[in-house]
Each structure stands twice: as C-alpha cells, then as structure tokens.
Image: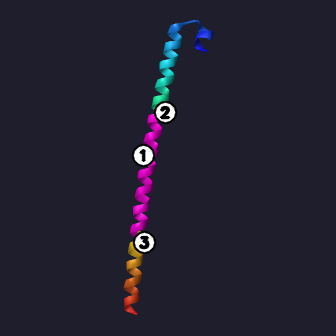
Amino acid sequence: MVYLVSHSIRSVIVTTLAGSLLLQVGYFGSVLFLVWRSSCAQRRAQRTEHCQRVRYQSQSYHEGDE
C-alpha cells in the first residue's frame, strides 16, 4: 500500500521496519503486563491464604478457652 501511494522502495522499507518494531514493542509490553498481573494475583492469593490461616488459628484458640 505504501508503495502504491509513494512509489518509493525506501518508504516501503522504512514503514515496514517501523511497523515491525512497533509490533515487537507492543508484544513485549503485553508479555510484561501479563507477568506482572500474574505475580500480583499470586501475591494476593498468598495473602488471602495467610489471613485465612490466621483467622482459623484465632478461632481454634478462642474455642479452647470455652
């Protein structure tokens, strides 16, 4: 399409390289985002598990007082 508009091979090469660079940056950014989101979810799950464990230990401690 670029060649039909500009009739220049140089414009085609530059546009192709710029487009592929943009695609690579977008792909790399999306992979980093997915890794970040996964690590946040994992930390959240660990905190939830810890809070539930503490709550269970607290309840069993108070039941022993009765």
Q: Residue at x 50, y 9 (%)?
A: 10
Instruction: Assign a secondary structure to mark 2.
Output: helix
Give coordinates of residue 45: x percent, y percent: 43, 61
Give the numbered dot on residue 35.
Answer: 1
Magenta span: 26-50
Q: Residues within 10 Å of mark 1 (few under 14, many from 20)?
A: few
Look at label 1 and name its amino acid. Val
Q: Residue at x 41, y 82 (%)?
A: 59
Displayed quadrant of residue 49: bottom left
Instruction: Assign a secondary structure to mark 3.
Output: helix
Q: Quadrant of the N terminus?
A: top right
Q: Residues within 10 Å of mark 3 (few under 14, many from 20)?
A: few
Q: Is residue 55 above or below residue 64?
A: above
Tell me whether the residue at label 2 lies in contact with that at label 3, contact meaning CB atoms closer than 8 angstroms. Answer: no
Q: Return the residue found at the far bottom.
A: 66
Give coordinates of residue 56: x percent, y percent: 41, 77
Q: Nearer the viewer, residue 12 or 66?
A: 12
Look at label 2 and name its amino acid. Gly
Give coordinates of residue 63: x percent, y percent: 41, 88
Q: Earlier in the sequence, mark 2 or mark 3?
A: 2
Q: Quadrant of the C terminus?
A: bottom left
Give coordinates of residue 29: x percent, y percent: 45, 37
What residue is pinned by disc 2?
Answer: 26
Q: Residue at x 39, y 80 (%)?
A: 58
Q: Is residue 19 above or below residue 51?
A: above
Q: Is residue 44 magenta?
A: yes
